[in-house]
Every structure is written in structure tokens, then in C-alpha cells.
Amino acid sequence: MNLDFIEEQEMLRTMARDFLQTECPKTLVRELEESDLGYSPELWKKMAELGWQGLAFPEEYGGTGMTFFELALLVEEMGRNILPGPFISTLVCGLTILEAGSEEQKREFLPKVAAGEMILTLALTEPSASWKPEHISVRAVASNEEYVINGTKLFVPDAHVADYLLVVARTEDSAKPEEGITVFLVDARSPGIQCEPQLTLGLDNKAEVVFKDVRVPKRNILGKLNQGWKVVQIAMTKGTALKIAEMSGGCQASLEMANAFVKERVQYGRPIGTFQVLQHYLADVWGKTDRTTHLAWEICWKVGAGVATPFEVAAAKAWTNEAYKWVTERCVQCHGAIGTTRDHDMGLYYRRAKVAELDYGDTDSQIEVVAQQMGLKTHGNDQRRGIRKPLAQNKERRRCGLRF
Amino acid sequence: MDFEPIAGTEELRKEFEDFFKEVMKDAPPGWANSPDDLATDEGWAFHQRIARELGKRGWLSLAWPKKYGGLGKSIFEQLTFNEVRAYYRAPGVDGFGLAMVAPTLLAMGTEEQREEFLPPIARGEVTWAQLWSEPEAGSDLANVQTMAVRDGDYYILNGQKVWTTGAHRADWAFAVVRTSKELTRSRGLSFLLFDLKSPGVEIRPLPTMSSHSRKVEAYFNEVFLDDVRVLVKNRVGEENQGWAITRATMNFERSGLAGLGGIRHSLDELIEFCKETRWRGKPLSEDPLIRYRLAEIAVGITAGLATARHVLWGQHRVEMGEAPAMEMVPRASSMKYYQTELDQRFVYLGCQIMGLYGQLKRESKWAPMAGKFERLYQSAPGPNIYAGSTEIQKNLVAWIGLGLPRT
């Protein structure tokens, strides 16, 4: 165990921070937020030239052969600076292909991702707004050498610029909802796909994606037929970890901004940072940020090493969800009214914190996983169907004399 | 940076776990390793027995140099021991001696002082008391009034100390006293070590709210010093330079408290209780609200663990002279009140889950978990106040961590 960074890691962080400060100033961030594309292809190319997209791919697939942890350190800097675009979306899918794909699929997709020539995204969530397999209703039906996909996905990040979507669909009904799910690599230009942007609080290019008789070849199944939920879990674990890294960077940036502001802003003839109330707010923010950062490093290292437990991942996301929101709220407060405006940078982080909570698992869904992993069952619910039994069938309730 | 499990410590961890599992079978009912528990005769005897056993094995001083009674192992073995012991909520460690006096002497004492005082601490044979606070010097410790007047090879001490945990059972004291009439506040302070059995020392119990007429067990004391003679050679650091020593020791104290393992164990116990206890026909653990809040505590513990480890990592570097003490102050301060507030939220949750039964003292046959939460509810505010109140810790984070101006 070594709780200090090695030199290469320090250099990576410094270099990334400097690069992003220069190449993606807040003026560009705002421009991209308002744009249809939502990212800068020029910047995307420069990042690929630096080896960022392929950082954690083996060299044989065009990558640099560094670790997932180091990729997370890079993403932390992206969160600190804010980098609108499909980096996390693409890497989550790329890393999933690396872990679950066939050799052919790896050779087809990974070098292109590393070269900055392919953008990917995971199409998982639907109007059911759930992270559970029982709430997947997009279907894929076999037809000769192809599958035909029908249904609607919602809240899909960066779908409008993706070259391929990793679509999570149900291919077979089963008593166990996690069985019968399959992940397909779907060309975004396939006929039958309609993509419509969903404007969000984060101005971050989520989309509704409607699949109408979309045909995808059998060989584009990622992993095994009907056993795709394992693949989804790989993607979700990686996505959760990278998101946490991004969020911890955002906490750090917010704190720095607020701290600098209270030292400059003068009221009552003195910098407001001399008032104890604000000092204590910021002390609390410092601590929350420090714990979030350490937790992010630890969980990202563990995910990279393949030793993170479902409990740890869920607990880390639950924590970071609430921490980032809380930090940004306090930092807005420290800025006074100016912190609530469109043009002040605090708003960029405040908005992103709320959206980040919802990506890769909102707090309630994470707490549910935590509780289950702690062995705390629920009562009255059939966990497998994820729905309450109709009241009349609930013997317990009848015995208690409950009448509703 | 890596979080690889500490190589070669798996066997040692198992040794620690086997030991604590065994000894904790003899713990008095409802044991929470709280000050209340340690204040009873039974609790104290239990603590001392374990201290001797730990001392015999060298486990109290794993990472110290061998010449002072240590095993010369690394910080990792020490961290492993701390985690396992904290998890089992086991006593046997004199926090004042091990977490405060020892690191202070290792970092700032003379060779003579290290050779004299460290080995008995390592053997678990001596208990220390912290003589710092006074009625007029709580958060504002620099306002200490106890005078120490030089007389040849001795100082003569006169004054009063308060909130002295465990003084009635302790052997030695480390005190902050005023050695100058001219130099004011922190400028005239010195750091002294002395035997509490010395003539002129009077100790009176100071009961907290959990004491009552049928059971006055106090862990706090007042200590009155009346012409107490203390050897000058037992002064740590230079005369009138004691404030710097004191501040470093304060930081060791905070770091030593950064152990979330104890809450984890208590949480596990509470969960077991909730699974086994039915209320209106269902186990408490299946109530959605209780379930949610138990999970939240688990999240809070998990979130703190990575940072807590870093606090101890940093402290060790300071002890070994590899890093300046100031570097670790913000993190140690921040974690101190993080842990005390998390523990408090946990205790309040436990009480709430107990419902009407939560008010019962252990003497009642109806008291759940031997009245554990009834006691903990009363000792819960204390940690937010002692070892540097939350408000003071926030000041330190603001001033040292964020560079905000001192007010």
C-alpha cells in the first residue's frame, strides 16, 4: 500500500490540468453547452493525440497501456475543469468491449476509440427510470442472422454524436429478470433509429432514442446472448467509478473558487472570508471535498484492480452524489447573489452536481444496493419482480386487519 | 498510489482478530468501549488485563524502534492492529500514553526521556492523564494559569486542572503549565511529565450526566496541584517553548481518533439486533426507513475510511521526522469532527430505533442491548467538544487548510 502518487501520476495530473485550462477555458465550456454538438471535435482530436482516449487500453489495441486508476486521475481533472463531451460515455463502452468483447470486436472498435475516431455510448435507461433489469422493456427479436430492436431509451448521454450505441435489450423472458438480457453493438446510422435531444439541467446532451425495427447482426452481440446483464454490470461499475472521479474534481474546483472569492470580496470594510460563519462553511466544504477525493481514488483503484465489491461501489456513488450537491450548494452560498447567476462559473458546477447524481445510479438506487449488500431485506416486496404484490394478496396485511 | 492490501500482514491480521475475538468474550454486557464503560471497576480491570496481554506481545508499539520497546515494524502493521482493535471495540490501549505521549517523545523528546518513558508504555504497564484544561482555559488553552516556579532541579507546581479523563486511575501526567510571569499566553508555557502519586496532588471526580446517586462513576476529574515538585529533566522541549510541543501533541491526539472501525462494529451489532428483534410482527431491519438510515451510516463509514487511513499515514511520517506537523493538521482536524459527528448520528439512530425502550438503564430487565444506547446517548455530545471542539477544528481547517485570515 502506498498512499502517495508516483512521479508519472503527478505528471499526468499536472499535464492534464494545464492542457485543459488552456484548451478548454470556461468560454468554450459555455459555447459547447449552447451548441448542438455539445463537444469540440478539434479538442477531441488533440486529446487523442495525447493518448487520452486510449490511456487504459493495451498497446496492442492502440492504447498506452496505463491503468484504469490513471484514467480516473485524468477524468478527475476533466471534472475539475469541466470538459463537455462524450469522454466518459465512450470510455465506459470501450472498457466494456475490452473486458467482454470478442477478439474481433476489440480489434474493430478499440483502436478507433484510441485514435479519437469513434464515439460510443451506453443506451440503458428507459422511461421506467430504473437501473434494474426488470424494468428493461426494449426488445430484440431474432430474425435469421439478425436481431430486430424495438423500443425507447431515455436519458442516453451523447447519443446524437455516437457512432455506435451499446443497446441493452430483452431477448428472452425469464423468471429471473437479470437473465434474458442482451447487449448489442448498434451502428448509430442504422435505419430506424431516431434520436431527439432532451434538454437538461446540465445542458449535457442527453437524448431520447427510439428504435423502430432496427436490425443488428448477430455478431454484434457483446458478450453472450441472454447473458448481457453481466456486461451491463461491467459498464455500470466502470461508469460509476469514472463519474465519481469526475465529481470529486468538480468539488475541488468549487472549493477553490469559493475560497478565492471570500478572500477578495469586501463588505463591511473587510474581506468576507474574515467572518467566522463563512470560514466554518468552507472548513466543512474542505473536509467533504477531501473525503470525496480520497474515496474516489480508492474506489477507482479498486475497480481497476477488479477488487471493488458491489457494496463499495454503491456506497461510494451514494456518498459522492450527496457530497457534490452539498459542496456546490455551499459554495454558491459563499458567493452570495452572484453565485446564482447564469454567467458566474459556480452555476456550471452546481448544475452538473445534480445531473451527476442521476448518472450511473441516483442516490436512492445506490442506497438500495447498499442495504441489500448489508443483508437488509425488505418486506412485502417481491425483489425479483421489483413490484409490490397487490394488497389483497398480502397475508400479513390482512392479518393485521389493515383495510386499504 | 495503490490500495493493495498490506502484503505480509494477512497472518498478523488473523492473529489480531483471533486474539480480540477471544478476549472480547469476557467483555462486560453492553460493552461499547466508551468512557462510561471504562469508568467502572469491572471495565477498568478488563482494560488493564488486555493492556498487559497486548504489552507482552509488543502490539502496543508495533512501529516503534526496537530500542524503545517497539517491534520495529512498519506503519502498515500498526494500521492493521488499529483497525482490528477498533472493530472489536476492545480496550487495552491507553490512548493518552500511546497516541499522545509516545508520539510526542518520539518526535520531540530527549533520548533519556524516550528510554525512560517509552518502554513502560509499550508494555502496557502505565496509564497517563492529560493535565491541560483548566476552568479558565478550555478552547483557549493558551490561557493556562497553573504556575510552575523553578527551584533548582525542580519546578514547584500550583494550580487546578479540569476534565482530566481517568486521572483517578492514572500513574503519570503530561501537563501544560506556565513557567514565566512576564511572558503572556502561549509564550510562557512549558510541557512537563510527572508522577500523579507525588505529594500535593489531589484528585476529585467530576461526574457527567450519566452518573446518578446509585452509581457515581466518573471518568472526568478535577486535579488540584499544591506545591507539587516536578523534575526539570522531565520537561519536554525548552522552557517557555511548550506551546509548540502542545500543538504537535494536539495533532497526534486528533489523528489517533481517526478510527472508524469502532462505529462499524457497533453498526454490525445494531443490525444484528434489528434482524433479531420483531416489532408488530416484522423484523426491525425490514422497515424501509430503518433500513435506509442504517445504509446511510454504512456509507458514511465507508467514505471516511480512505481518508482516515491517510491521516495515520501522515502522522507516522511526522513521527519519523519525514514531514512537518503542519501538513497533517487540516486533515486530522477535519476527520476528528467528521468521526465524532458520524458517531453521534449513529448513536441517535440507535436510540431512535429502540423507541420507548431506549430510555431504560441497563439495570432494567427490559433494557435492550444492556442499555447500551441509553449510555451512549449521554456520552455522545462529549467527543464533539473535547480534544478540540468542532468549532476550533473548523477554525484550524479554515486558517491552515484554506489560508483564511485568523480572526
Image (cartoon, grey):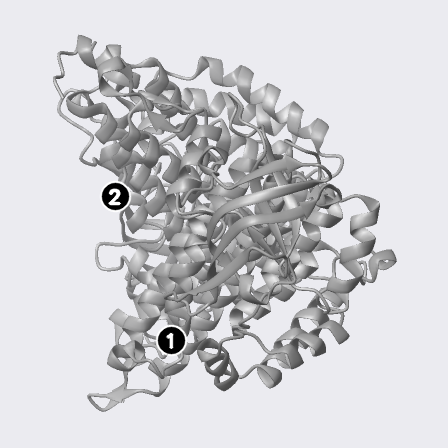
Q: Name the kind of residue labelled 2 in the image.
A: Pro
Name the mark on residue A346. 1
Relative depth, front residue between B40 and B323: B323
Report whether A402 appears left or right of B89: left
Report whether B221 appears left or right of A133: left
Q: Name the kind of residue labelled 1 in the image.
A: Met
Residue A169 visible to an observer of this rendering: yes
Quarter-of-image position of residue A251: bottom left
Image quadrant occupied by the C terminus of chain A: top left
- Residue A264 sits above or below residue A193 on the image: below
- Residue B333 sits above or below residue B210 on the image: below
How far apart marks 1 and 2 lie (CA) works out to: 35 Å
Relative depth, front residue between A379 and A323: A379
Residue drawn at point x = 44 percent, y = 47 percent: A126
Taking the view exactly as shown, the residue that stands out farthest to the right is A60
Across and down, in percent, residue A149 comes to 57, 44
Q: Name the residue under label 2.
A: B381
Q: Mark 2 lies on which chain?
A: B
- Residue B352 sits above or below residue B176 on the image: above
Across and down, in percent, residue B400 comes to 44, 71
Q: Is mark 1 on a helix, strand or loop?
A: helix
Q: Mark 1 lies on which chain?
A: A
Quarter-of-image position of residue A48: bottom right
Residue under disc 1 on the same chain as residue under disc 2: no
Do the residues bearing badges 1 and 2 touch, measured as CB atoms within 8 Å? Answer: no
Relative depth, front residue between B142 and B366: B366
